[in-house]
Image: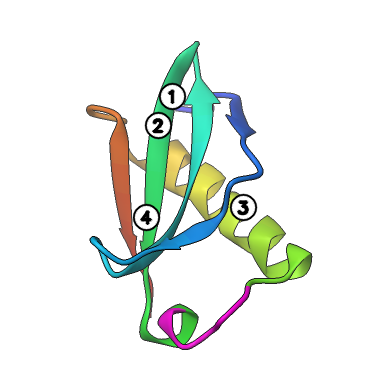
Amino acid sequence: MNQAILFNDDLCFNKENDAWCFTGQISGEQITIYFHSVQLKQLGKIDSCTKFDLEEIVELWLDKNELIGSTVHIQMR
């Protein structure tokens, strides 16, 4: 798929979805990405290195999957 995504600097823990999340923009549309992970849930704060890793995970996910709607849920082990 190889779409360019712009990530916003709004990484936070979403209690409603019980996951870390941030937003991004693809082709002018805003999307929200949720990361479901037991290890990430235990963190009180995510550093910039981990944030860059999460951005890379999203890019790899977009290469392999078609974006449907404005929400992405990524299950991590």
Question: What label sits on residue 31 in the rendered view?
Answer: 2
N-terminal of the pair, mark 3 or mark 2, is: 2
Residue visible at 51% across and 59% down in the picture: 12
Q: Mark 4 and mark 2: span between their CA atoms?
A: 10 Å
Q: Residues within 10 Å of mark 4 (few under 14, many from 20)?
A: many
Question: In the image, residue 1 lies at what x, y percent?
Answer: 44, 27
- Whether pointer 3 and pointer 2 mark residues with C-beta atoms closer than 8 Å, the reply is no
Q: Amino acid at mark 4?
A: Tyr
Task: Give the number of the mark in front: 4 or 3.
Answer: 4
Disc 1 secondary structure class: strand
Task: Give the residue number, with chain letter if any, for mark 1.
Answer: 30
According to the picture, the residue beneath numbered tag 3 turns out to be 56
x and y percentages locating residue 77 in the rendered image: 37, 80
Q: Is residue 43 above or below residue 60?
A: below
Q: Secondary structure at mark 2?
A: strand
Image point (66%, 60%), residue name: 51
Q: Give me the residue at 59% from left, 46% from top.
A: 10
**Residue type pointed to by label 2:** Ile
Measured as percent of width and height from the top left, residue 13 is found at 44, 65
List the residue tagged with mark 4: 34
Quarter assignment of residue 52 = bottom right
Q: Disc 4 and disc 3: Cα gap in Å?
A: 14 Å
Residue 71 can be seen in this image? yes
For the residue pair 74 and 20, the one nearer the viewer reads as 20
Q: Contact, CB < 8 Å: mark 1 with mark 2?
A: yes
Q: Position of residue 40 (x, y in %)?
A: 48, 79
Residue 6 placement, left or right of 12 = right
Mark 3: secondary structure: helix
The part of the chain drawn in magenta is 41-45
Residue 66 visible, this orientation: no
Residue 43 within the segment the image draws in magenta? yes
